[in-house]
Image (spheres, rainbow, N blue to C red):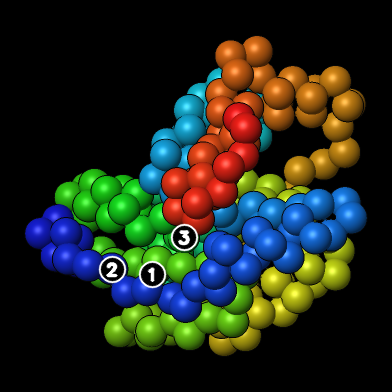
Amino acid sequence: MDARRALAPLPQLEDDGFAQCLLEGLAKTPKEIPCKYFYDAEGSRLFDAICELPEYYQTRTEMGLLAAHGEEIAALIGPDAGIVEFGAGALKKVRLLLDVLEAPRGYTPIDISGDYLLDVVRTLAADYPNLALRPLVGDFTTALTIPPLPGARRRAGFFPGSTIGNFTPGAALGLLTRMRLALQGGGLLIGVDLVKDPSRLHAAYNDSAGITAAFNKNLLVRANRELGADFDL
């Protein structure tokens, strides 16, 4: 996909409905709302800002690991692979992987925010003009049908960011099972945070600049705007 083709409407995966998930989540004890609904265009922008905060160590740590061990990871993935990234976001980490892979056959980033994904894929297409791009808009936690990438000998999943920590053990198992099916026997490169001192976690998820607070409240802003809710921010 070149930069001009990246401007075309992106394929959509089926969405299970913000309103229904909100109603079901608020009826639970404790109340919960799926984390995927953080990521409209504004939510994605705010999360990018969170990743640059001094308190938010996760992004820097993973970027460092990918830079230090990229060639070893690429050797394990092998040549002619199709890369599938779940919850792709800003597409920064995958660049470190793409730069060391041998003859990658294509890249499928999956993200729930279509407008945001369109922007970042356009930039990636300009920087990697020879890479086949097949972006998908939708919820990667559901059963996925991912179109094949021509010439790819295998699929390799990419799931950085410690996002797996957002799920209960049962939900995480279901997610990994669905990923295994979607990858058709390929491997999964996943980021998992380790046990930390609570003070470090509190700092990372309650930053002094208030950006994480704005990110959390943006989900309620969405509900007010899109669903006619009346949450008092």
Residue corresponding to mark 1: 136
Point out the residue furthest to the top here. 208
Q: Is residue 69 left or right of residue 145?
A: right
Residue for badge 2 = 10
Of the two numbered discs 1 and 2 on the same chain, state the one appearing first in sequence.
2
Separation (CA) of disc 3 from disc 1: 8 Å
Instruction: Count how many numbered circles sit on residues in the image.
Output: 3
Vertical placement of residue 87 versus 161, above or below? below
Q: Determine whether 100 is above or below 208 in the image.
A: below
| Residue 174 in the image: above or below residue 135 | below
Numbered disc 3: secondary structure: loop
Circle nearer the N terminus (3, 1) = 3
User: x, y percentage for residue 13?
Assistant: 44, 76
Task: Please indicate whether residue 3 sits to the left or right of residue 175 in the image.
Answer: left
- In this view of the protein, which residue sits in the foreground, 219 or 113? 219
Look at label 1 and name its amino acid.
Answer: Leu
* Residue 129 picture location, percent across and down: 17, 57
Label 1–label 2 contact, CB within 8 A: yes
Lateral position of residue 168 relative to residue 25, left or right: right
| Residue, disc 3 | 112
The residue positioned 46% from the left and 68% from the top of the image is: 138
Q: Are marks 3 and 1 in contact (CB under 8 Å)?
A: no
Give me the residue at 28% from left, 68% from top.
10
Question: Residue at 32% of width from left, 84% of height from top?
Answer: 151
In the image shown, does 224 or 70 lie closer to the viewer? 224
Q: Amino acid at mark 3?
A: Ile
Residue 72 screen position, x and y as percent: 57, 54
